[in-house]
Image: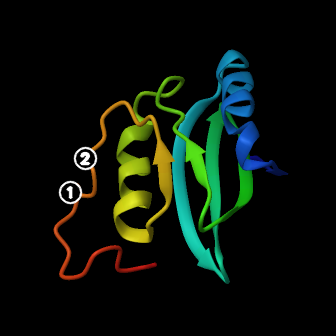
Amino acid sequence: MNTEFVNVNPENIIDESQKLKFAGYHLMQQCATRVPDAYELIYTFGKELEVKQLKMTLPEDQEISSITSIYPCAFIYENEMHDLFGVQIKMINIDFEGKLYRTAIETPFK
Protein backbone atom coordinates (compact mmCIF):
# COMPACT_ATOMS: atom_id res chain seq x y z
CA MET A 1 0.00 0.00 0.00
CA ASN A 2 1.31 3.44 -0.94
CA THR A 3 0.43 6.48 1.14
CA GLU A 4 1.06 10.04 0.04
CA PHE A 5 0.59 13.23 2.06
CA VAL A 6 -0.11 16.39 0.08
CA ASN A 7 -0.11 19.79 1.78
CA VAL A 8 -2.91 21.98 0.42
CA ASN A 9 -4.33 25.40 1.18
CA PRO A 10 -7.84 25.33 2.69
CA GLU A 11 -9.19 27.42 -0.20
CA ASN A 12 -8.15 24.64 -2.63
CA ILE A 13 -9.96 21.75 -0.92
CA ILE A 14 -12.82 21.71 -3.44
CA ASP A 15 -10.51 21.64 -6.47
CA GLU A 16 -8.22 18.99 -4.95
CA SER A 17 -11.15 16.79 -3.90
CA GLN A 18 -12.69 17.10 -7.36
CA LYS A 19 -9.42 15.99 -9.00
CA LEU A 20 -9.30 12.91 -6.79
CA LYS A 21 -12.95 12.07 -7.49
CA PHE A 22 -12.33 12.26 -11.25
CA ALA A 23 -9.27 10.04 -10.80
CA GLY A 24 -11.43 7.36 -9.16
CA TYR A 25 -10.60 7.89 -5.49
CA HIS A 26 -13.21 7.43 -2.76
CA LEU A 27 -13.34 9.29 0.54
CA MET A 28 -12.03 7.15 3.41
CA GLN A 29 -12.12 9.64 6.30
CA GLN A 30 -11.68 13.22 7.45
CA CYS A 31 -10.25 14.23 10.79
CA ALA A 32 -9.35 17.32 12.77
CA THR A 33 -7.01 18.10 15.61
CA ARG A 34 -6.10 21.28 17.45
CA VAL A 35 -2.81 23.08 17.05
CA PRO A 36 -2.11 26.51 18.57
CA ASP A 37 -4.64 29.02 17.15
CA ALA A 38 -5.61 26.64 14.33
CA TYR A 39 -6.87 23.22 13.29
CA GLU A 40 -4.96 20.58 11.40
CA LEU A 41 -7.31 18.84 8.98
CA ILE A 42 -6.57 15.62 7.10
CA TYR A 43 -8.77 14.28 4.32
CA THR A 44 -7.96 10.67 3.31
CA PHE A 45 -8.83 9.22 -0.10
CA GLY A 46 -8.25 5.73 -1.44
CA LYS A 47 -8.15 3.92 -4.75
CA GLU A 48 -7.16 0.25 -4.85
CA LEU A 49 -3.92 0.17 -2.81
CA GLU A 50 -3.20 3.90 -3.15
CA VAL A 51 -3.97 6.30 -0.31
CA LYS A 52 -3.71 10.07 -0.69
CA GLN A 53 -4.08 12.39 2.27
CA LEU A 54 -4.72 16.08 1.88
CA LYS A 55 -3.33 17.91 4.90
CA MET A 56 -3.88 21.55 5.80
CA THR A 57 -3.72 24.02 8.64
CA LEU A 58 -6.88 26.09 9.03
CA PRO A 59 -6.73 29.19 11.26
CA GLU A 60 -9.46 28.94 13.90
CA ASP A 61 -11.18 32.10 12.64
CA GLN A 62 -11.36 30.89 9.01
CA GLU A 63 -14.14 28.88 7.32
CA ILE A 64 -13.60 25.98 4.97
CA SER A 65 -15.93 24.79 2.21
CA SER A 66 -17.68 21.46 2.55
CA ILE A 67 -16.80 18.71 0.10
CA THR A 68 -20.30 17.19 0.31
CA SER A 69 -21.10 18.42 -3.20
CA ILE A 70 -18.36 16.04 -4.41
CA TYR A 71 -18.53 13.30 -1.75
CA PRO A 72 -22.03 13.34 -0.19
CA CYS A 73 -20.92 10.94 2.57
CA ALA A 74 -18.57 13.65 3.94
CA PHE A 75 -21.51 15.20 5.83
CA ILE A 76 -20.97 12.92 8.82
CA TYR A 77 -17.25 13.76 9.13
CA GLU A 78 -17.84 17.47 8.64
CA ASN A 79 -20.61 17.64 11.23
CA GLU A 80 -18.33 15.79 13.64
CA MET A 81 -15.44 18.21 13.04
CA HIS A 82 -17.83 21.11 13.62
CA ASP A 83 -19.48 19.69 16.75
CA LEU A 84 -16.40 18.37 18.52
CA PHE A 85 -13.68 20.81 17.44
CA GLY A 86 -15.55 23.94 16.34
CA VAL A 87 -14.30 23.86 12.74
CA GLN A 88 -16.42 26.30 10.70
CA ILE A 89 -17.54 24.44 7.57
CA LYS A 90 -19.81 26.18 5.08
CA MET A 91 -22.35 24.59 2.74
CA ILE A 92 -22.60 21.10 4.30
CA ASN A 93 -25.38 19.32 2.38
CA ILE A 94 -26.82 17.80 5.57
CA ASP A 95 -25.95 20.19 8.39
CA PHE A 96 -26.92 19.15 11.92
CA GLU A 97 -26.02 22.69 13.12
CA GLY A 98 -24.10 21.52 16.17
CA LYS A 99 -26.54 18.79 17.16
CA LEU A 100 -24.98 15.63 15.70
CA TYR A 101 -23.63 14.66 19.13
CA ARG A 102 -24.97 15.26 22.60
CA THR A 103 -22.06 16.53 24.64
CA ALA A 104 -21.89 17.93 28.16
CA ILE A 105 -20.05 20.98 26.84
CA GLU A 106 -20.14 22.63 23.43
CA THR A 107 -17.18 21.73 21.17
CA PRO A 108 -15.32 19.66 23.81
CA PHE A 109 -12.07 19.40 21.82
CA LYS A 110 -11.77 23.09 20.96
User: In the rendered image, which residue does mark 1 sit on?
Assistant: 99
Q: Is residue 42 above or below residue 45?
A: below
Disc 2 and disc 1: Cα gap in Å? 5 Å
Specify whether 94 is left or right of 2.
Answer: left
Sort mark 2 into few (<14), some (14-19) or many (20+) by Cα contacts within 10 Å: some
Instruction: Where is residue 98? Give x, y as percent.
Output: 27, 57
- Snapshot quadrant of residue 46: top right
Instruction: Where is residue 104? Give x, y as percent.
Output: 18, 82
Specify whether 5 is left or right of 65.
Answer: right
Instruction: Where is residue 53? Give x, y as percent.
Output: 71, 49
* Kind of residue indicated by mark 2: Phe
Residue 96, which numbered label? 2
Instruction: Where is residue 55? Give x, y as percent.
Output: 73, 55
Residue 20, which numbered label? none
- Snapshot quadrant of residue 17: top right
Whether label 2 touches label 1, CB < 8 Å: yes
* Label tally: 2
Under circle 2, the secondary element is loop
Q: Residue furthest front?
A: 61
* Kind of residue indicated by mark 1: Lys
